[in-house]
Amino acid sequence: VSPGGVASLVGVEADFGLSPDAPDAESRQRLANWIADAHNPLFARVIVNRLWHYHFGVGLVDTPNDFGFNGARPTHPELLDWLAAELVRQDFSLKSIQRLIVTSATYRQDSRYNPAAAAVDADNRLLWRKEPQRLEAEVLRDAMLTAGGEINLAVGGPGYYDFTTFTRNTQFYEMLDPVGHSFNRRSLYRTWVRSGRNPLLDVFDCPDPSTKTPRRAVTTTPLQALSLLNNSFVLRMSHRLADRLQQEAGPNIPRQITLAYHLTYARPPDPSELDSLTPFVATHGLPALCRVIFNSSEFLYID
C-alpha cells in the first residue's frame, strides 16, 4: 500500500506520490505537508479555534478535539472561517493571530457581570463580556517565579526533573521540590512522568499526562488555598519576593507594598489597601503579605 492521505477530504490531493517502500521519514514529511496544506479546510480552523480556546477559556467550537458530526456547532462560524483564512494569509504565524485576538474589542471587554445579558446568554457563548479565567497550574507556578525574580528564561535544551526514581522490583517515582536556578525554568520544560504527579500543579487541575485533555477542568477547592499557604514552593517564592521587595524598595513598608502590587497585580494599591496592609506587614512580616497576595483572586484570575 502506498502512503497517502484521506481521499474523501475535499480540497487537498490524497496521493503523496510515493512508492510502497518509501522511507518512513519521507512518508511522515508528506503527511505533515498534507495536513498543513493551505487548501486543507480543517487544519487552519482547528488551530485558530484552539488559540481562541486558550484565550477565552472556550473555543468558538467548544469541542476542540472534534470538528465532526458529533462535535459542537460553532457559535460564530463566519468569524471562525475569517480567522482561519487570516492564519493562512499570515503564513500560519501563530503570534500574528494571537496578537489579533488579544487586541480585539471582544477580548478587551470588561468582565463585569450583566444580569440582562446573562438572562439571554448565561454561558456567555455570544461573548458579551470577557469571562474571568483562572491561571493554569503551570502558568501560576511561572507567575510566582517571575514575581520572586527567580524565573530561568533559558530556551531549549533538556527539561528539569522534579522527581527522583528508584527500582524495587518495578520502577517508582518520588516527587521533589528541588531548589536551584536550573529547576526554576518555565513549567513548559518540566519533564513529565505518568505516575509522578506534582502536588501543587495537581491541586490546580493540571491534567493527568496519561490521558488526553482537550479542555481542562477548573475547580475551586479548600486544598488550593491550603496549598498556597503551606506548599514548600509557595513558601520559598514568598520569601524570595519578600527579599526582592526589601532590596528594591528599601525599608519603607508602604513602598514595599506598592512594589509588591506592581509586580503581582500590575497596579498600585489604593489608599485603603495601604492603610490596612502597612500594620499587617509591621506585625507579620513581608513573607506573610506575599503569601496573602499569591492566594488572592486578583493574582489567580485574569479579569
Image (tube, grey):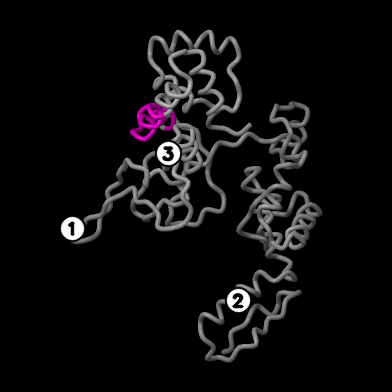
Residue 265 versus residue 258 in the image, above or below: below
Q: CA distance from mark 2 to mark 3?
A: 38 Å
Image side of residue 19 versus residue 96, left or right:
left
Residue 270 versus residue 75 in the image, above or below: above
Which residues are the magenta region? 224-240
What is the quadrant of residue 56 in the picture?
A: top right
- The residue located at (77%, 61%) in the rendering is 89
Q: Secondary structure at mark 1?
A: strand
Q: Earlier in the sequence, mark 1 or mark 2?
A: 2
Instruction: Tell which of 130 and 264 is nearer to you.
Output: 264
Q: Secondary structure at mark 3?
A: helix
Numbered mark located on residue 168 in the image: 1
**Residue hosting label 2:** 31
Instruction: Determine if the magenta segment contains residue 102.
Output: no
Of the residues shown, which amino acid type is indicated by label 2? Leu
Of the residues shown, which amino acid type is indicated by label 1? Arg
Q: Position of residue 197 (x, y in %)?
A: 36, 47
Residue 112 versus residue 26 in the image, above or below: above
What is the quadrant of residue 88 in the picture?
A: bottom right
Q: Position of residue 112 (x, y in %)?
A: 70, 27
Instruction: Tell which of 192 and 142 is nearer to you.
Output: 142
Instruction: Tell which of 194 and 140 is nearer to you.
Output: 140
- The residue located at (46%, 50%) in the rendering is 154
- The residue located at (48%, 24%) in the rendering is 293
Crowd rating for badge 2 (residues with CA inside 10 Å; few <14, some 14–19, many 20+): some
